[in-house]
Amino acid sequence: MRVSESERQALIKALEIGEEWGYGNVISHLRTAWAKKLAAEGLPESGAHGGTVMPFKMQEDVLRRGFWDHTGKSYLTQPTE
């Protein structure tokens, strides 16, 4: 999967905003806005507050290259030492 250059830049900006104003604060507002959107589409509020966190390497790939391994396989394996 790929993201556009404008989306990649927006994601970088969002992380800068999180750094400046507090990630938890920004995440809380984003998750609430997302839950409101899902609830407006018919999902009960109790179910709208779900969500997942992507693997660290996946986020790094999106921000650096604009795409990631959509299969997720490369993010699920840990290097053995």
Image (cartoon, helix red, strand yellow):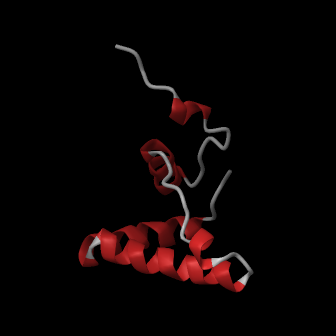
Q: Is residue 25 left or right of residue 58?
A: left
Of the pair 47 and 37, the residue shown nearer to us: 47
Where is residue 66? Give x, y as percent: 57, 55
Residue drawn at point x = 26 percent, y = 78 percent: 21
Q: Quadrant of residue 18?
A: bottom left
Q: Quadrant of residue 51?
A: bottom right
Q: Is residue 56 left or right of residue 8?
A: left
Indicate the quadrant containing the C terminus: top left, top right, bottom left or bottom right. Answer: top left
Where is residue 22? Give x, y as percent: 27, 73
Residue drawn at point x = 32 percent, y = 69 percent: 23
Of the pair 40 and 81, the residue shown nearer to us: 40
Q: On screen, 51 above or below 60?
A: below
Most extreme residue toward the top, as rendered?
81
Q: On screen, 37 above or below 62?
A: below
Of the pair 47 and 73, the residue shown nearer to us: 47
Residue drawn at point x = 32 percent, y = 77 percent: 25
Q: Is residue 7 left or right of residue 42?
A: left
Q: How many marks?
A: 0
Q: Is residue 1 left or right of residue 35?
A: right
Where is residue 63? Give x, y as percent: 47, 56
Most extreme residue toward the right, as rendered?
42
Residue drawn at point x = 67 percent, y = 38 percent: 71
Q: On screen, 46 above or below 68?
A: below
